[in-house]
Amino acid sequence: MTVTELVSYEDALASYDPVMGLEVHVELGTKTKMFCGCATTLGADPNAQTCPTCLGLPGALPVVNAMGVESAIRIGLALNCEIAEWCRFARKNYFYPDMPKNFQTSQYDEPIAFNGYLDVQLADGEVFRVGIERAHMEEDTGKSTHVGGATGRIHGASHSLLDYNRAGIPLIEIVTRPIEGAGARAPEVARAYVAELRELIRALGVSEARMEMGQLRCDVNLSLRPHGRETFGTRSETKNVNSLRSVERAVRFEVQRHAAVLDAGGTIVQETRHFHEENGTTTSGRVKEEAEDYRYFPEPDLVPVVPAREWVEELRAGLPELPLARRNRLREQWGISAHEMQSVLNAGAVELIVATVEAGAEPAAARKWWMGELARRANEQGVELAALPITPAQVARVTALVAEGALNDKLARQAIEGVLAGEGDPDAVVEKRGLRIVSDEGALGKAVDEAIEANAAVADKVRAGKVAAAGALVGAVMKATRGQADAARARQLILERLGVAE
């Protein structure tokens, strides 16, 4: 089916209710792999971080990474899950070249965390609760690089290269319950859920959760059911979606594709699909296996995991303030709306503003500069806000110079420009560029007198009672001083010179 054959999103929703299931894989930031002592450092030479255990060589035995278990429990607690008193690993059997053991060590019917939920806030402030079915521990596979084809996929490639450095990296897979009732907002809910989950993972400190680096990957399951019907439709699974925008686009596309197939009298195939960033479409991968196809059985080489209740409660007590609660607290402190807070979150500016306020800035001023001038420059350069070469302390100093009356907004933008250009801290840039506001009576008075003399007609209007005309004289003073005059003081002097009361 081509893109041109899709039905519109609105028409799809007129006939069907979307039902989603999201499976998110989180790569833990442990120093060693899940079942062996190999390092997890990024950027190592291919196959340099491997051993007999993660390569699946005969006789090698696994040992569970304790930090991986602790991270799984902390994630489960943060997701309001129950923590199993007893759980164990299983072998998920299937063949693929990037999995050297021919099975993946995972958890099947006995996950470490289950029966939870995560509240996510949408752009308009509405809170949507997503049920969590389970969060379980497993290991990652290796990386295949398909060479010689046009698409980078195995079909059409002349050969493949395998790097097993990633094989055995600790993963936590978080599986939602079927997400119903989102209606037209299903794509937005999916994006908001993954975004909130990413923030939660980062707050826990268990992973950097950088989607562009594969540290957090989302599989999007979607089905449609006709209005009024109770049973779910057949689902498709779009694999390894690696950006928030792509999660949203994948849901929207699959809604339209499913509707087009069903409207034409066709049948949805239960399959995995690939998402294409360049045009927001998906294409068929392979027919999706059922659980029984993997021939799960308990891992005989690993003992069960039995977390002590005292330990679990210690971990619960040590959880940080979770992202949604923290944002709501900050939003109240900053006096902004839910929509404005969502914009700050989307811009990646929450922590930058927090740090700027901690450095002495007022919240409104900190938000103004990060969401205004600095966001504009980041967009122009195509980088994240945090990647700009300016610190929250430097932004706080700029706001202080404005509050002191040493700079106005125009001059402050020039000071920021200098800091970004590597000219030093704000004070050094201000002195080097001569940016301070002209407020002393001598220099400012002279500029005022010259403006009145050069604009006699305007001055006469002001004397005649048209006080608003003084703005033109203020503008002349600002031009003469290259924008460095204290505009308010200049206006006062103009009116005093012309004998006019405000």
Image (spheres, rainbow, N blue to C red):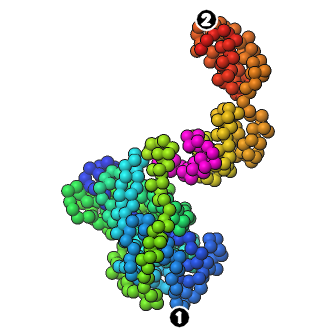
Q: Residue 328's x, y, as percent? A: 45, 50
Q: Residue 348's x, y, as percent? A: 54, 52
Which residue type does callout 2 highlight?
Ala
In terms of secondary structure, where does tag 1 sit? Answer: loop
- Does residue 341 belong to the magenta stretch? yes
Residue 439: quadrant of the picture: top right
Q: Is residue 269 left or right of residue 393?
A: left
Q: Quadrant of the C terminus?
A: top right
Q: Is residue 93 left or right of residue 269?
A: right
Residue that sits furthest to the bottom in the current view = 59
Q: Is residue 490 above or below residue 287?
A: above
- Please tell me which of labels 1 and 2 falls first in the chain: 1
Which residue carries the number 1 mark?
Answer: 59
Q: Residue 253's x, y, as percent? A: 38, 56
| Residue density around tag 1, few if under 14, some if 14–19, many if 20 or more, within 10 Å | few
Q: Quadrant of the N terminus?
A: bottom left
Query: Which disc is residue 464 wearing?
Result: 2
The structure residue drawn at horizontal position 70% and vertical position 28%, both measured from the top left corner, is 483
| 37, 191: nearer the viewer | 37
Image: magenta residue range: 340-367
The structure residue drawn at horizontal position 76% and vertical position 46%, both measured from the top left corner, is 424
Q: Residue 92's x, y, as percent? A: 41, 82
Which residue type does callout 1 highlight?
Gly
| 313, 171: nearer the viewer | 313
